[in-house]
Amino acid sequence: MDTNDKHPHSSESPFEADVSRKVRTCVVGLGHWGPNLVRAIERHQRAEVVVAVDQSSERRALISQKIPNLPLEATFADCLEKHQFDAVFVAVPTELHYQIGMQVLQAGKHLFMEKPLAGNSQECRELCEEADRRKLQLMTGHIFMFNDGITTMKQIVKQGDLGNLFYLHSVRTNLGPLRTDVNAIWDLASHDISIFNYIFESLPMQVTCSAYSLLGRPMQDVAQGTLVYPNNRIAAFFVSWLDPQKKREITAVGDRKMLVFDDMKPERPLKIFDKGITVSKPTEYSDNFNNFRMSIRDGGCLEPETTTGEPLFNECCHFIDSVIAGTRPRTDGYNGFDVVRILEALTRSMSEGGRPVSLWHQESSATRRAS
Ligand SMILES: NC(=O)c1ccc[n+]([C@@H]2O[C@H](COP(=O)([O-])OP(=O)(O)OC[C@H]3O[C@@H](n4cnc5c(N)ncnc54)[C@H](O)[C@@H]3O)[C@@H](O)[C@H]2O)c1
């Protein structure tokens, strides 16, 4: 995706014409995540949070103690009526993403929506089309695309340091927090899917998934899935809300080297292992596998230096800079749409006992964006 892609219908950005003009923002949802967005937006020199919203009076009372000068409202409609702003960051439960996202776009405001973009692909498509129609920027909060460890991992893979990439796998576990609006696949694996698509630069053709409600709630707490990408490359995830250890790991296995990204070690998140197995064929024809020679290479391990900017700050800056420049965000609405299509296919596989579900007919986000 070209990050400097001008919006297909964009006119000159008013923020480029007037360099002293700040992007005035509104943050909707002040639960666990929303206050982090407020803090990150305020660090951008050309942005300010002019108002924030939460329907819960308890949350508003708590936030007014923590951030004393921030005007707070109970509904987004109140914000529209009483405040002037250009862009909105939304961090409410997923089931409300479409409803609030549509209100934001129809009010003519640029929209940053937390992941997953919406509760189903039809809603995602409508949000994308509405943003296009109104010439507004729409960004999905796929935060790992703004994590320096992941972007460095992508460079390492792309320049061929790992050789031919065989597979990716991820582990994303913790003890809670248990969500009630979506299951562990939609909450946690949405991160892994966005990373897999980014590293492989393609979309999966087939997925399988199994998930379990071990705590007896309607939402599955533990799940595993496999995604088959073009050229026989595979990615697998394991996610759980019911695990003694917080893990956020992605492993990439190539035919030359292997790499592990560990988000729990933000100072040095990457390790590159000079390890591999070479299988040499016997000089004469043989159908006995014992005659194949396997040499195991178990070389050293390198921990490359990575810049360690805060991913959330990088992500918020990217959206604000996109609004200022009138350019499409890297994780635009169609990028979020792709992830939701895959989540839907995984859900179908899960409900059909782990049956493989094909996605071969899927158009690429680049094609849809071009229209
Ligand atoms: N990128 C990340 O790493 C990351 C991390 C955590 C959460 N998230 C995402 O952020 C979103 C919110 O997650 P959370 O953990 O903060 O949830 P949360 O339940 O802690 O907070 C949601 C807040 O929204 C408020 N709310 C609900 N309906 C509202 C409405 N109609 N108008 C105004 N406020 C309303 C609730 O009162 C609550 O305070 C989710 O989409 C989640 O996936 C992303």
Image (cartoon, grey):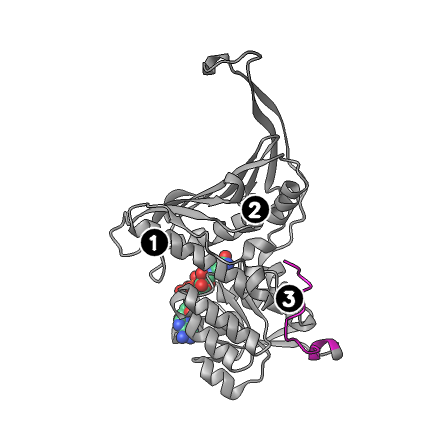
Image-based side of 40 in relation to 170, left or right: right
State the SS at label 2.
helix
Q: Residues within 10 Å of mark 2 (few under 14, many from 20)?
A: many
Task: Give percent across and percent down for residue 358.
Answer: 41, 50
Task: Pick out the residue farthest to the front.
Answer: 285
Q: Give the Cα distance between marks 1 and 3.
A: 41 Å
Q: Residue at x 61, y 64 (%)?
A: 329
> Is residue 12 covered in magenta?
yes
**Residue position for label 2:** 200
Q: Residue at x 41, y 55 (%)?
A: 343
Q: Residues within 10 Å of mark 3 (few under 14, many from 20)?
A: few
Q: Residues within 10 Å of mark 1 (few under 14, many from 20)?
A: some
Task: Give percent across and percent down for residue 302.
Answer: 65, 33
Q: Are marks 2 and 3 in contact (CB under 8 Å)?
A: no
Q: Give the Cα distance between marks 2 and 3.
A: 32 Å
* Rendered image quadrant of residue 305: top right
**Residue position for label 1:** 348
Mark identifier at residue 43:
3
